[in-house]
Image: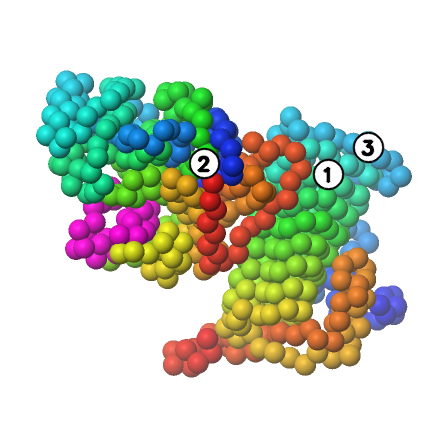
Amino acid sequence: MCGIAGLIHRGKSSKVGHELQGMLQALKHRGEDSTGYALYGDTDGKNFIMRFKVGENVGEGSTSVAEDVSVYDERKKIVDSYLNEMGAKIIKEERILPYSLRYEIEYNKKDLLEFSQKIESIPGVEILSMGKSLEVIKDLGNAKMVCDRYNLDKLVGTHAIGHARMATESGVDIKSAHPFWGYPFSDVSVVHNGQLTNYWNNRRALENKGMRFMSECDSELIAVYLAEKMRDGASLEEGMRESLTGLDGVFTYFVATKDSLGMAKDTMAAKPLVLYESDDLVAMGSEEIAIRSILPQEIDTYDPFDGEVKVWQI
Amino acid sequence: MANIKSVSKKTKAQAMGMHTEVLTGRTQQKFFNPDEAENFYYFGTHDVDFNKRTDLDVKDMTAAEANKEIDNLMGQGYGTIVIKNPQGKHSLGVGILNKLNLIFEGSLGYFGMGSCDGPIVRINGRVGWSCAENLMAGKVVIEKNAGSCFGAAIRGGDLICKGSVGARTGIDMKGGTIIIGGDAGAFTGFMMQRGRIIILGDVGINLGDSMYDGTIFVGGEIGSYGSDAVDAELTKSDQDWLKRKLKVAEIGENFDVSKMKKIVAGKKLWNYDNLEPTEKKGAI
């Protein structure tokens, strides 16, 4: 059934990694096959942060095939050489896990399409996120396990979205975990609760337009769908409103950019969402207990109605 | 209510709300023997004193622990229980088949007050999905907003939300009354079979979709009508009932009920099983 959560601080920063961990852990009964975070940290905005993987987590019920670490090392070397070829300079490099890396990159070209295609042409390599404040971290296990594994507790930023996944439509692996990066737009991420029934029709149409899919998870369609709309000049909110008719099925999804957070709910209102909104904080989740994990005091919350789209700025 | 001792068995059963329906394409009612009602009781219920009051802080309890403690307190004769720090927990207050004054100081998560028969409940906060599902008797008042599937399949009692509610309010309801002070979402009254829904504000799309029977009153705008939901004349008797009900519910006492819309089942779907495919298309 999956659980989603998101929050945005308006006019200040906070420990969004810690806050989102609490919200997602409160929703772990909705699924703990994998958990993903899209965190928008405080950065100077000069360099790109690229989160990528060179392999899969093959433990904890993964459906992926085990590979030797030497294979990961080889892929990393190729990534490094491709970055060098494209004129991208690695400022800082962190290998958090054998298969998961974080690079701070100086790269001056704006178009990330060619960049991403080149890196992802290496078999087994996937860019999880590319942005100047966005960092997508996703792995198998519940929110606390992933938070501890990647040391996300101390990350300070303005907003974040996350996902606790019960795998139904695709495998238990990192590539099928949410959030999905809104490739090739920097700093765009999506999480989704629900099921899309016109996935293949939309996927074929979007692939014919040059858009890329990395998984067979229906939720990835939302990220690609919105990215394609924005590529054609639509604003985020316009793209989201179009998705209410362009996407078929049941869904509640969140989308975040470097300075905004949005939510959309299908016209049947079939998937839950509870929302808290104040002047300095918006927090939302599949269940109220997610919000209560960061706001234990009595607050006013509500369920957005069917077909509702909302976008907040930081 | 008529003198219950002098009326026929059928009328007596109806007055006491003690009949069920067997749905096989059209309504068939099956009546209990009301003489057996006097001997009817739920196993494990308690004699309680409404003047005996206590607080219960559930902050560090699971829902199961909290519900067990409520039952334990009723066993000790407490008739008024105030629940502190519910903090959006799911499934609080479920399965209470007892007379009881229950007050929640805060909000509930999903499935709060489900399958209850008899308690008077006030929730000084919000409730999540499926509040008071299968309520059989009693009264549940929510001071703030409510999630979707509010009052799903209730059979009796009064369910009142002073704020707005989500989608599918009163889905499959078979009796009782649901009163909404604010707005209601899509598919309100979806497949309802009996009972009444009152919405003082606006309501979303597909109102009363596939409703089998029952009545919906709307004070605001209607997004759209669902299959087989049609307008009906708002009678003087309806208006009197609405005024009485809103007064008792302590909600919208000064609301002008004469401008409310009344929606009922068109009953084209009643004989759905007997229709030819082309006729079915016409019905929906």
Query: Are discs 3 and 2 less than 8 Å apart at CB?
Result: no
Disc 3 and disc 1 in contact, CB within 8 angstroms? no
Tell me the magenta residue range.
A202-231
Verify whether residue B55 appears in magenta. Answer: no
Residue holding disc 3: B54
Chain assignment, label 1: B
Q: Amino acid at mark 2?
A: His
The image shows residue B4 at horizontal and vertical percentages of 85, 66
* Residue that appears at 64% across and 69% down: B220
**Residue at the (62%, 60%) spot, across then down:** B183
Residue A209, magenta (yes or no): yes
Instruction: Check disc 2 and report its element: helix, strand or loop.
Output: strand
- Tag 1: amino acid: Glu
The residue tagged 2 is A159
Q: Residue A109: which quarter of the image?
A: top left
Q: Main secondary structure of the magenta part?
A: helix
* Mark in front: 3 vs 2: 2
Q: CA distance from mark 3 to mark 1?
A: 13 Å
Q: CA distance from mark 1 to mark 2?
A: 31 Å
Q: Provide the chain ID for the residue under circle 2.
A: A
Q: Which mark is residue B105?
A: 1
